[in-house]
Amino acid sequence: MSGTTWSVVLAKRAILDLLGAADWPGAMPQLSWGTPKVLEREHIVLGDVNNSDQEWAGIGDRRRNEDYRIEIWVGVSKAGDSQEEATTRAVELFGVVETVLRANSNLSAAIPAGQWAEIRSPSLTEYPTDGGFAAFVGSEIRVKARI
C-alpha cells in the first residue's frame, strides 16, 4: 500500500477504474477524484470521506478493521424545457454506478485482506438552470475493509 495503511486511496482508485471500464448508455460522463476545476454537463465525482472508523485487532500491530463512507455525486445539466430529461439521465447514470458496485463489491480485490463496498442513502435534487434543468444524485459508498 506504499505510504499509507488507510485503504481509502486504494478504494477511490479502484472505484474510478471500475467506472472507467463500465458500459455507459450514451456518452461516458466525466469521472473525477474530487471536484474538478470545470464540471462537464454530465459528471460523477468521488468526494469527501466521512464517518471513518478504525478498529485495531488484538493480533499484530497493523491489523485493523476500517469502516468509512465515500461521498459520490452524479450530476446532469441539460438544456431545454424539461426537468424530467435531466432527472432521468442522472438516475440512469447512477444506475450504472449501482450496477458496477453490485458486480464488484470487493472492488476487484484492490485492498488486500478483503473488503466490500455498497451504495447507501441516495438522494435526488432537481433545479432549473439559466438554460435548462439539472439533476443531482448524491449518495455514499460505504467501504468496510480489514487491513
Image (cartoon, helix red, strand yellow):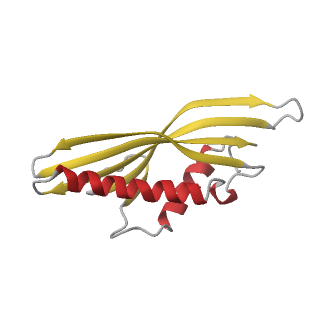
User: Which sits in the foreground, 20 or 9?
Assistant: 20
Q: Relative to 140, does residue 41 appear above or below in the rendering?
A: below
Instruction: Decide if residue 11 is on the left or right side of residue 130.
Output: right
Position in image of residue 90 (x %, y %): 32, 53
Left or right for 5, reference 51: right
Residue 38 visible (yes or no): no
Residue at (77% x, 35% y) in the render: 64
Task: Give the percent coordinates (x, y) of residue 89.
Answer: 30, 57
**On the image, which quarter does residue 81 sit in?**
bottom left
**Residue 133 in view in this figure:** yes
State which quarter of the image contains the C terminus. Answer: top right
Position of residue 39 measured from the top left corner of the image (x, y, whole percent) = 29, 53
- In this view, the residue in front, 8 or 143, is 143
Q: Residue 62, percent across and down?
A: 81, 37
Point 69% across, 30% down: residue: 54
Total numbered badges shown on the rendered structure: 0
Q: As drawn, is 59 to the left or to the right of 12?
A: right
Residue at image x 66%, y 54%?
Answer: 106
Quadrant of res 124: top left
Does 112 sit above or below residue 139?
A: below
**Residue plotted at (70% across, 42% down):** 145
Q: Quadrant of residue 25?
A: bottom left
